[in-house]
Amino acid sequence: MKILDDVARFVARLASEAVCDGCIAQKRSLADVALASQASHELAGSHGFERFKGVCSMCDEGGMMIRRH
Ligand SMILES: [Zn+2]
């Protein structure tokens, strides 16, 4: 899936910085935050991606984040 690949590359580029679904949607020009959330859920648990509760490195909002180790 193209969105999934795009989000995966975006998160991977941030090294271990956490990013929220809202920032993923905004930075990748996704039509809906739900698309970012879905991609984030699918990535979590594979290839070093993890979803966790934290603070976003881009907007400083708290909530569910994703990052890659
Ligand atoms: Zn954010």
Image: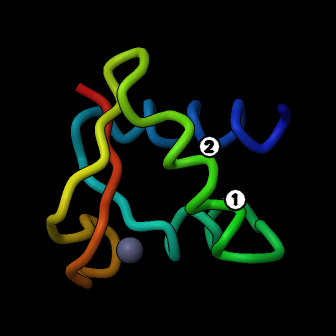
Above or below, comparing residue 49 to residue 17 in the picture:
above
The residue located at (83%, 75%) in the rendering is 31
Crowding near the residue tagged with mark 2, few <14, some 14–19, many ≥20 C-alpha atoms within 10 Å: many
State the image coordinates of residue 32 (x, y, percent, origin top left).
Answer: 75, 76
Q: In the image, ligand 1 is in what quadrant?
A: bottom left
The three-letter amino acid code for the residue at tag 2 is: Val
Q: Quadrant of the N terminus?
A: top right
Identity of the residue drawn at 22% across and 37% down: 16
Q: Which residue is mark 2?
A: 7
Q: Viewed as shown, does residue 23 lie left or right of 27? A: left
Name above or below for residue 31 compared with residue 42.
Answer: below
Instruction: Pick whichever of labels 1 and 2 is earlier in the sequence.
Output: 2
Q: Is residue 9 left or right of residue 64?
A: right
Q: Which residue is mark 1?
A: 28
- Give the color scheme: rainbow, by chain, secondary structure or one colour: rainbow
- Residue 20 numbered tag: none
Q: The residue tagged with tag 1: helix, strand or loop? A: loop
Percent of width and height locating residue 69: 23, 25
Disc 2 element:
helix
Amino acid type at circle 1 is Arg
Q: How many marks?
A: 2
Other residues around mark 1 within 10 Å, as few (<14) / some (14–19) / many (≥20): some
Where is residue 53, by image quadrant?
A: bottom left
Residue 16 vs residue 31, the one in the foreground? 31
Q: Are marks 1 and 2 in contact (CB under 8 Å)?
A: yes
> Residue 68 is drawn in which quadrant?
top left
Q: Give the answer, above or below, for where 50 lies relative to 63.
A: above
